[in-house]
Image: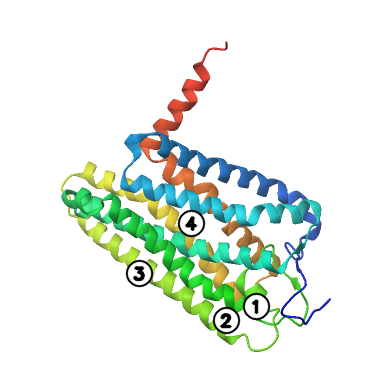
Amino acid sequence: MSYSNHSSPLPFILTGIPGLEAAQFWIAFPFCTMYIMAVLGNFTVLMVIRADSSLHQPLFYFFSMLAAIDLVLVTSTMPKLLSIFWFQTHEIIFEGCVVQMFFIHGFSAVESGILLAMAFDRYLAICRPLHYSAILTGRTIAKLCLAAAVRGIGLMTPLTCMVSSLSYCGTHVIPHSYCEHMSVVKLACGDTRPNSIYGMTSAIFIVGLDITLIAISYALILRAVLGLSSREARLKSFFTCGSHIGVILLFYVPGFFSFCVQRWGQSIPVHLHILMADLYLLVPPMLNPLIYGMRTKAIRERVLSLLWQKEIQPVS
C-alpha cells in the first residue's frame, strides 16, 4: 500500500498499538473509563471556578486554562483511539491527521507555558506575598496566558506546514495510535532533515526553557521556605507547592521518555513505547483535576457542597 501524489495524498492507516492488536478491544475499556474521568474532572473544575466568584483569583485562572487545554488534548486523540480499538476504524484522512498532530503538539507546548506561569504564581505568593496582588493583575494573567498560547501555537504552526508540504511515496501505515510528528515524517520520501531539526529544536527550546525557569523559581521558593522560622509555615508552603510539582512531574517525565524513545530508543519494544505515548495524553488530564483541584481546599469544598446539596434536595 503506497502512494506518491503529494497534492492529494491517500488517507493514513493508524495501527493502534503494534503487537497488542488482539488485546486492543479490552484495553479500550480502561482507556474509555480514564477518558470519561478526564472529561468530567476538568469540566467540573471549569464549572466550579466559573460559578464561584470567590475563586476568581490568579491561581484558579491558571487552573482553568490547564483544564481547558487538557480537555482539548484528550478530545483530539481519545475518540479516534477508541474507535480504532473497538470498531477497527484505522483510516484517517491526511488533513485530519495533520490537524490532530497540530492539536497534540501545539497544545502540549501551551500547557508547558501555563505550568511555567503557575510556577511564577507560586514564587510570588511565597517569596513576594506583599506584591502578589499588585503584580498578578487580571491584565498580567491575560498576557501570560496569551504569551503561552502564541508561543506554543506559533512554533507548531510552521511544523504543521512543513509536514503538509512533504511528499509521501511509500507506505501510509502509521505504527501508532495517533498522528505524532515523527511517526508521520518517517513515511515521507525525500529530505526530512529540516522537519526533524525544527521539531527537535522547538521541543528543546520550549521544554528546556520552561524547565530551567521552573527550576529557578522553585530554588528561590525552597530558599525562602527554609528561611521561615515557623515549622507550620514551612509545611503549609510545601503543601501549596506540592500539587503543582506533582502536575509538573506528571507532564514532563512521560513526555521526555516518549520524546527520547521516538528518536533513539530502538531497543525498547514498540508496543511499550506506543502504550506509554497513549497514556501520556490520557493520564495527566485524568489526574490533574484530582491533584490540583481536589487538593485545593476552596475547589474541594465547593464541589463537596454542590454534591451535598444534590443529595439533600427533596424529591418533588
**Residue on which the image places disc 3:** 212
Residue visible at 81% across and 78% down in the picture: 2
In the rendered image, the residue lying farthest to the top is 316
| Local SS, label 2 | helix
Q: Do the residues labelled 3 and 1 touch (CB within 8 Å)?
A: no
User: Viewer-nearest of labels 3 and 1?
Assistant: 1
Taking 278 as reference, is 33 above or below it?
above
Residue 121 image-quadrant placement: bottom left
Q: Which of marks 3 and 1 is nearer the N terminus?
A: 1
Q: Where is residue 283 in the image (x, y as percent from the top left)?
A: 56, 52
Q: Is residue 283 visible?
A: yes
Of the 4 image quadrants, the one containing the C terminus is top right
| Local SS, label 1 | helix
Q: Residues within 10 Å of mark 2 (few under 14, many from 20)?
A: many
Q: Where is residue 314 in the image (x, y as percent from the top left)?
A: 53, 12
**Residue on which the image places disc 4:** 250
The CA distance from mark 1 to mark 4 is 27 Å
Looking at the rendered structure, which numbered label has been put on residue 195? 2
Question: Which is nearer the eye, 185 or 236?
Answer: 185
Q: Can residue 267 be seen in this view?
A: no
Looking at the rendered structure, which numbered label has been put on residue 185? 1
